[in-house]
Amino acid sequence: MRGMNRILKVWAVVLLLTLTGWAVPNQKAALSRANMDTSVKAGNDFYRYSNGKWMDANPIPGAYARWTAFDELRENNRVMMKKLVDNILKLKDVKRGTPDQQIRDLFRLGMDQVRRNKEGLTALKFWLDKVDRLEKKDDIPSTLAWLNTWGIRPVFNFYGSPDKKNSEMTIAQISQGGLGLPDRDYYLNKGKRYADMRNAYVKHLEAMFKLMGDDADTALAHASVVMKFETRLAMKSMTRVERRNPHKTYHKMRLAELSKLSPSFNWRMFFDGVRLKNPGDINVGQPEFVKELGAMLNEVPLEDWKTYLRWNLINSTAGYLSADFEAQDFEFYGKFLSGKQEMEENWKRVLGTVNRSMGEALGQLYVKAYFPASAKNRMLKLVGNLKVALGERIRGLEWMSEPTRIKALEKLDAIRVKIGYPDKWRDYRGLQIKSDSYVRNVLRARKFNFEWRRAKIGKPVDRDEWHMYPQTVNAYYNPSNNEIVFPAAILQFPFFNMEADDAVNYGAVGVVIGHEMTHGFDDQGRQYDKYGNLKDWWTIADSDEFNKRAAVLAEQYDDFSVGDGEHVNGKLTLGENIADLGGILVAFQAWKNSLGGKPVPKIDGFTGEQRFFLGFSQIWRGNIRQKELLRRVKEDVHSPAEFRVNGPLRNVQAFYDAFGVKEGDAMYLPKTKWAVIW
């Protein structure tokens, strides 16, 4: 369901010159003057200087809300995955229960739009009838549990994840959720933009209820019920900035304590319903939200609850139903919120469904076809070089005391590195993909995956597990495991180029690897120790000094305007901004170390230093629609690409030296205003 996805910190990573045999057709030079707009002074807008011509020559395709170097790679990647699926579709004999059969039948049903249109809502009758038969509010907890088992999560989120203060154990988690709009602020903020958004959402609700069979007056009444219900949830929801503080979302308790928090809600019935008879430790992310849940159970009429649950069922499955549901869903979430002009081709949407349903099965095929196992060892060596550079910077920090420095170096040394793909693949035996209906199979896959995740609760954490599939174009740092993870799909062009020199590749790959490492020491990551436990290992003075220096960076980003009266939120994006700045500094030092004091010749008129920063900036090239930009500054922990380049570089002496940035240039900041952290 939208607005409630647990988001891992992610950033891209690419591979250095040692990688071979991992190429994409039509590869172009990673650093090209043709991409640059040299009519712009580098010291005024380095992002435009580096990427301006590329931006002009690459308008956003209609099906996209933005078009970036990441999206170019994702498009190529999807074509590669589609070839794998096409090979399966050609097979004549496939054994039932095998990944080939599961992938083949799910994909075929998704592509059969005629059948989906003919089915309409009949494929969901079993689930709709269950909600319709709800006769008393006492049964709401068990109904919510039942919906959760099918991957539909009204009101709140239930899942298992590591205990923040005992990272060896997986415990049950309860956190706020239940909103159809992407953020609680959209329900509560004043101003015309937010009022227009709420009005558009109500109209979307009306349209969806009409598609469900309501007449005009009933649809309007039901839309009002949902809006009122969700607004009440929003009023008790934490802001995104508040949720970035791991201590504010850590309230571990047992079932008896949870029951006292909202006594009207039968939590024993809920946990029985999700087949967790003995939940053990439970972390409640937002206690005030849970209290409100109990109050709403008492005060909101049963019929309103049923209307809300009916909406959640449809909202969660609209993309797998008939074309009219899918089109209306896109009309609001794709077009209105993000500015997209058209839906993606159906094969791309269906491929995404297969990927979400059984990602490691598809990933195993992807790795076998496209990713050389030898790349793992080469990447590990590269990460080791970046670790050395970050260690040197930590040792050289003037503001950090020795006791904290020792702990920081221990944590750095303990960071685990995962490259390409997992050593052990997940088994999808037991996942039933039948020939009856696309949406029913999607729900069966959700149930299969829910049960797999639920079974982990109360057991030791599997530290070898991956939280991204190998075919995912992204990367992440996981504080509970103190690990950095680089899936295979990101380890290719355009982020790596065999023809580029070391300066460019360090500017790209070095920065992004350094970024992921720095996440272990950003304003959130620094609060976890080397074992992944939420534990304060800083002296009070060092902690205060870090916060003071981080606040300088937050204030810098608060000043960045994105138009329509909106600005970047420096506190929301602080962790990513710290990692961006740290990544640049660490990678530059690693590149300098690699030279061994030898001079670097100019190439195409650029010094090595200049090529480093150009390599960094050009991986962030992109265009974005204004609606999507405005949406992201409210929801995304990452700053817009322009500010991921220009923002940190204002605090980097080597950049000033490379391009002669001086007072009077737009990017110039006096050193007294620099953020000096890592």
Image (spheres, rainbow, N blue to C red):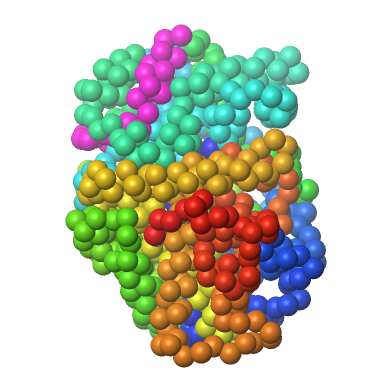
> Do we see residue 323 in this rendering?
no
Q: Give yes or no for residue 314 being in the magenta stretch.
A: no
Residue 66 location (% of width, % of height): 69, 54
From which residue to which does the magenta span run? 275-299
Residue found 70% across the figure and 19% down from its top: 219
Q: Nearer the viewer, residue 376 or 347?
A: 376
> Do we see residue 656 in this rendering?
yes
Q: Using the image, determine if residue 658 lies above or below residue 241.
A: below
Residue found 30% across the figure and 15% down from its top: 263
Q: Nearer the viewer, residue 281 or 323?
A: 281
Left or right of 424, for residue 656: right
Q: Give the number of marks.
A: 0
Q: Nearer the viewer, residue 390 or 207?
A: 390
Residue found 52% across the figure and 63% down from its top: 652
Residue 3 location (% of width, % of height): 54, 37
Q: Using the image, determine if residue 284 lies above or below residue 351.
A: above
Q: Give yes or no for residue 283 being in the magenta stretch.
A: yes
